[in-house]
Image: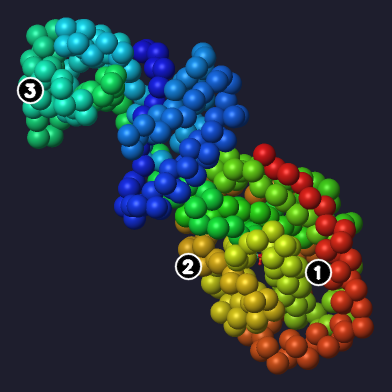
Amino acid sequence: MMKYKAFLIKYAEIGIKGKNRYIFENALVSQIKCALQKVDGSFQVTKEQGRLYVEALSDYDYEDVTEALKCVFGIVAICPVKIIEDTTWETLVKEVAKYMEETYEDKNFTFKVAAKRADKNYPYTSPEICIEMGAYLLEQFPELTVDVHNPEVVVNVEIRSKAYIYSVIIPGLGGLPVGTAGKAMVLLSGGIDSPVSSYMVAKRGVEVEAVYFHAPPYTSERAKQKVIDLAKKVSKYTGPIKLHVINFTEIQMYIYDQCPHDQLTIIMKRYMVKLAEALGEKDGCLGLVTGESIGQVASQTMQSMAVIEEACSMPIYRPVIAFDKQDIVDIAEKIGTYEISIQPYEDCCTTFVAKHPVTKPTLKSICKSETHLEEKIGEMFQKALDTVEIIEIA
Ligand code: ATP
Ligand code: MG
């Protein structure tokens, strides 16, 4: 196989005109650099005439680099590119032929040449380059067939101060570069749904932080480790995640002791979003994110969610709200979180869950129950914030 020294990075340009374009490109460059830090080798990311290139400055592993780039939101396509310094015609045709030789073992396919000429002094026009180069390649490789309308392979030849040749297109994830849409606090449990939600908001450019509510000894160290492992998987796409671990035991026990058990989950969730909001506000988050989906469990009816979100003033985003479980599972499998999520470790919500939780709570009844918490909840809330453990996931 051919050894490429560079990759052309293609991104969608819709809606990123003017000033936004510059923000978008800079965010993309920094996300690409961040993704490549985890890959062996030294790379340079450059912006040239509205084009992004990743150039290898050392040896590298092709699979590792393309895998890393395939996880960066905002990239539509990754094209391994051959760069030719000497653009004189005689050299160029030979180099393109060599490129075809090295890239395609079997040349029984249809093709066309697509040329772009940024250097207007170049002795051939773009249509001439297409025709002449196509003819030269046919001469060299008689197995090839030209098809200008629907070719299997488009050989792109771009002539600037150097010439760039590419024909292989590796699809990227699309979306927007992380960091272009503000920051959110994800309530990250060990389940299937919240890691998928993290991935989905990040795909729209949102930078994510996370909070996990830990209830030792009812939830084990292993359950916490599972959340850390999930955050690590998700961070492949989102970039580094600041994970907050809140010790929730005291609050949870207090609610359990003071409130009707069928309302336990709702009241607990209300304190979760309040705590998440307090942490998020400190770090400049613009919203909370959960893995809730309508009707999945008692606390995810529209009535329950309305009562839960009344507890905080930040918007709560629920990317999988209208997804069937299987649709969520499909994404979880694709992003590699599913295997971790299905490990059987207790969640703090399941430990104390009532046999018959309310499915249609009213705000009035919940607020009435919460009056039983007045004596100690303020103090416990502050203590939970003061003792938060922060784990930097990179
Ligand atoms: P998931 O698959 O994400 O765990 P779930 O279907 O198990 O979701 P619930 O347990 O009702 O649903 O939780 C709903 C949402 O509340 C979760 O998606 C998550 O965002 C948040 N959540 C629940 N438990 C915790 C926890 N211990 N720490 C942080 N967030 C939590
Ligand atoms: Mg869960």
Q: Which label belongs to residue 128?
A: 3
For image coordinates 74% across by 57% down, the residue present is: 212
Query: Residue 394, image x and y in percent?
Result: 67, 39
Q: Is residue 350 depicted above or below 63 in this figure?
A: below
Disc 1 crowd, CA 10 A, few/some/many (<14, 14-19, 20+): some
For image coordinates 55% across by 73% down, the residue present is: 295
Q: Which residue is mark 1?
A: 352
Quadrant of the snapshot with the N terminus = top left
Query: Residue 6, image x and y in percent?
Result: 40, 22
Foreground pick, 299 / 60? 60
The kind of secondary structure element at disc 2 is: loop
Query: Residue 259, image x and y in percent?
Result: 83, 83
Q: Is residue 257 visible?
A: no
Disc 2 crowd, CA 10 A, few/some/many (<14, 14-19, 20+): few
Foreground pick, 301 / 326? 301
Q: Mark 3 or mark 1: which is in front? A: 3
Q: Give the quadrant of residue 248.
A: bottom right
Q: Is mark 3 within 8 Å of ligand 1?
A: no
Amino acid marked by disc 3: Glu
Q: Give the quadrant of residue 4.
A: top left
Specify which label sits upstream in the sequence, 1 or 2: 2
Q: CA distance from mark 3 to mark 1?
A: 74 Å
Specify which label sits upstream in the sequence, 3 or 1: 3
Amino acid marked by disc 1: Phe
Q: Which label belongs to residue 322?
A: 2
Amino acid marked by disc 2: Ala
In the rendered structure, the answer to whether residue 199 lies left or right of residue 260 reads left
Specify which label sits upstream in the sequence, 2 or 3: 3
Q: Is residue 4 depicted above or below 340 in this figure?
A: above
Foreground pick, 128 / 104? 128
For image coordinates 27% across by 11% down, the residue present is: 86
* Cβ–Cβ under 8 Å for marks 2 and 3: no
